[in-house]
Amino acid sequence: MRDNIAIDGPAGAGKSTIAKEIARQLSFVYVDTGAMYRAMAYYLLQQGIPPEDAQGMEKACRTADITIQYENGEQQVILNHENVTARLRSEEVGNMASVSSASPAIRRKLVELQRQMARSTNVVMDGRDIGTQVLPDANVKIFLTASAHTRAVRRYKELTERGIACDIHAIEADINERDHRDMTREISPLRQAEDAVLVDTSDMDIPEVIHAILEIYEEKK
Ligand code: C5P
């Protein structure tokens, strides 16, 4: 049986930063499932397939080949033989991913890929449904969250530091909208698994969160 850590939570809770560092410290592989949904969204945008087009989405699942590779420990998403990792972080792709990830066909395809990865190696996997659907037997499940305001401020700082002009109110509205979509969708909504530990990072810094999760891992191991 593999040692797997599932980290779920809303957008901007710090999942990827935290999960990446925990994976590094434990020598596990970090799997960013959001990037897979973003890659599918990127493909849909590229092909001009709107999320209302269920048939188009099913077809896209057959024609989009998504594989994951690692370069210097960093996850790379390969879409039809092209490394698209650098193109996945835009708001446009994120918003599309939040809508298109409700497609059952897309979820089936990506959950299968995620389970395959967790079978072949020890993983720290982050997403929305890892503890509830993808890896229900993961030995450690964390539900990482923070208030919408805290998450908006973090995202604002991140974008401003990268020289990207943005509006904090628009970011917070976007976060609330995305949370709502992720939590109310019919298939695999974002929710805390019954056996997950809730970690609210609103008043914690990154080292504190990492320390808390590593302690939970040590206790449960
Ligand atoms: O985490 P990230 O913002 O990169 O995820 C993009 C979108 O992909 C989310 O808004 C969510 O709707 C979707 N997603 C999902 N299930 C996952 C990971 C991400 O539905 N396991």
Image (cartoon, rainbow, N blue to C red):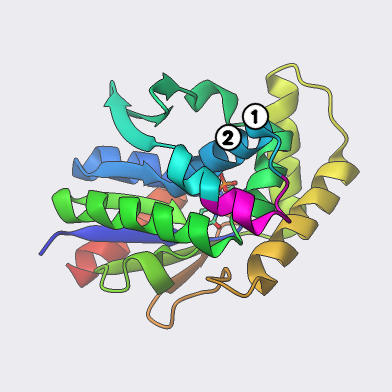
Question: Which x, y percent locates residue 192?
Answer: 50, 74
Span shown in magenta = 50-58
Q: Is residue 199 left or right of residue 177?
A: left
Which residue lies under the disc numbered 2? 43
Which residue lies under the disc numbered 1? 46
Q: Residue at x 56, y 57 (%)?
A: 201
Specify the quadrant that holds the C terminus.
bottom left
Q: Is 18 above or below relative to 158?
A: below
Q: Is residue 33 left or right of residue 166?
A: left
* Residue 101 visible, this orientation: yes
Q: Residue at x 32, y 73 (%)?
A: 136
Specify the quadrant that holds the N terminus.
bottom left
Quadrant in which residue 169 is drawn: top right
Residue 56 covered by magenta stretch: yes
Residue lying furthest left: 1
In the rendered structure, which amino acid carries the disc numbered 2?
Answer: Tyr
Residues at circles 1 and 2 in contact by the CB criterion of under 8 Å = yes
- SS for tag 1? helix
